[in-house]
Image (spheres, coloured by chain):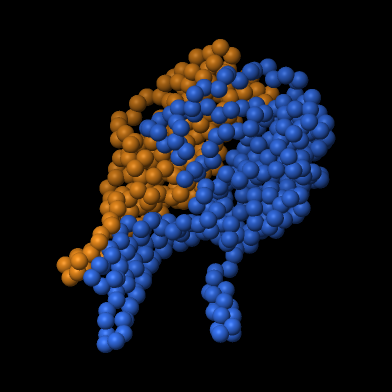
Amino acid sequence: MTSRLLLATIALAACRPAATYLVAQAPGRLAEADRLSSVPAIILVTPQDRRPEAERGGRAAEISFLFLLASTGGSISHAAGAAVLDGDDMLRWSNHGFPGGDDSNPSSVASDIGKALQSAAGRPIKYVVAMANAAAADAADGTVIATVVLDHATQITPTNADHNQTTRQQGNHQVTTTTSSSETFGSYWTFAFQIELGEVRDRRVARRLVLHVASSASSPTAYGDAVQKAATEVVHAVASEWSKPSSATPPFSPAPAGPRRCARPSGACGSSRAMRIRSTGLPSSRPATGDR
Amino acid sequence: MVKMIVLAAVVMSGCAIRSTRARDATLHYHPTLDELRTAPAVGPMEPLPRAPLATIALKRVTSAYPQPIGLDYSDDGGFRKVIGVEWSAEELEAALSDALPLALAGADSAVMHARGSIVSVALYRFGGTMYALAALELRVSHEGAEVYAARYTASLQGPDREQLLVALANRLVSQIAHDDHLAVALGGGVR
């Protein structure tokens, strides 16, 4: 009995698809990195995970009809849409040393971006488990604090699937017949990050920039592309916009936050609208691009 | 074929039926079809307002939306089938890159800079109707410090893909040109 259970367990483990290992190559040092010499330090702080629920636990294509055959106990169903990979169980990352990070969560993504940034900037990156404002309290003027926000990391498979199960009595036996068919339209990998940059003055975040990066492809190499883009964008933004020291106080004060005109998490409340985003050093409250 | 099997099953046995119209047929990072259906039909192209925000120069428009951007279905009923995948929206990107600098009146002497990021594009076809939605995030900075950030969203429906995407770009640009909060953030309004 025990050996049967063991065999069954081994068989199940063998049938389970293997997790995908996401790898990012570090880019070479960028020429613009020379302009970062006035930056005392670059600190990567605790990342934020804004992946939609479907990307953490997976989702099958929507079942568009289901017939339950009451007289025979059978069923017929049809699904059409896109299946979403169970990201927490089916994705693996390396972790290059973000403190407190495990091998399958946003801190691993942040550590990949940190490694790429270290290479692109040609200088060491410091990792701190804290929010940006807390990290700024102990940082020297001119320090750049980066927060990685993970918006999307998933594989999407557009699918049509039909399932048909019938049950009939044959002598003393009940015979169940199941037929399934499906067609897919390929698999698509998509990754999207935000990098929120803050520059420290007087132990607080005085200047702030937000960068968006996305990469999609039919293979998981899109992850490496997104990580390299993120590192390159950070070096470019700091070198081009922050090469001159900031004044102590920004000359423009942001207007007071207006009412959110759309309260639905999916952000779809009508044909057109503008939604203010809180700015300058405050934690962002906006939703990720995917919210469902 | 599927319809035939279902009809045969209905005739031959007592059965319970659950059939849905497409609701969650969209990708998980997009609004549901029910929400997309609230969009107005695409109409004649309106001329863009020429009310430039004279102190802003656009640095660039980046594409930062997750892909694919949608699916093509045979119809929107319970028997629908996926028949194609919408991958990208070059028409929208090109139209925004053309129209946005004009609305912001880019100039070398500008004291502020703006970055535009297309953060979401949804494009779905159900039979002969297409539904589209796009979101653009605009971030305005002065001396490297962000002074204004807003997300503009527009949605439309219609039969023609290119017309839909270009009209969406125009709607987004029009919202930016008429954004009073933006004008106030620039120091009392410069329009």
Q: x and y percent of residue A179 in the render?
A: 34, 74
Image vertical order of residue A279 relative to residue A129, above or below: above
Q: Is residue B27 left or right of residue A25?
A: left
Q: x and y percent of residue A130 in the render?
A: 73, 40
> Which residue of the protein is positioned furthest toward the left in this rendering?
B11
Chain A tint in image: blue
Q: Which residue is found at the position 40% from the left and 24% from the top?
A: B48
Image vertical order of residue A181 relative to residue B158, above or below: below
Closer to the camera, A42 or B191? Answer: A42
Quadrant of the image containing the N terminus of chain B:
bottom left
Q: x and y percent of residue A262 in the render?
A: 45, 31
Closer to the camera, A168 or A270? Answer: A168
Q: x and y percent of residue B81 in the render?
A: 32, 58
Q: Is residue B144 left or right of residue A62?
A: right
In the rendered picture of this protein, how many numbered marks are placed on residues? 0
Q: Is residue B166 visible?
A: no
Chain in orange, by letter, is B
Q: Which residue is found at the position 45% from the left and 40% from the top?
A: A266
Image vertical order of residue B42 relative to residue B51, above or below: below
Which quadrant holds residue A269? top left
> Which residue of the protein is positioned furthest toward the top in this rendering?
B188
Q: Which residue is found at the position 67% from the left and 44% from the top?
A: A47
> Which residue of the protein is positioned furthest toward the bottom in this rendering?
A171
Which quadrant holds residue A8? bottom right
Image vertical order of residue A203 relative to residue A126, above or below: above
Q: Which residue is found at the position 55% from the left and 39% from the top?
A: B62
Closer to the camera, A73 or B8? Answer: A73
Q: Is residue B19 visible?
A: yes
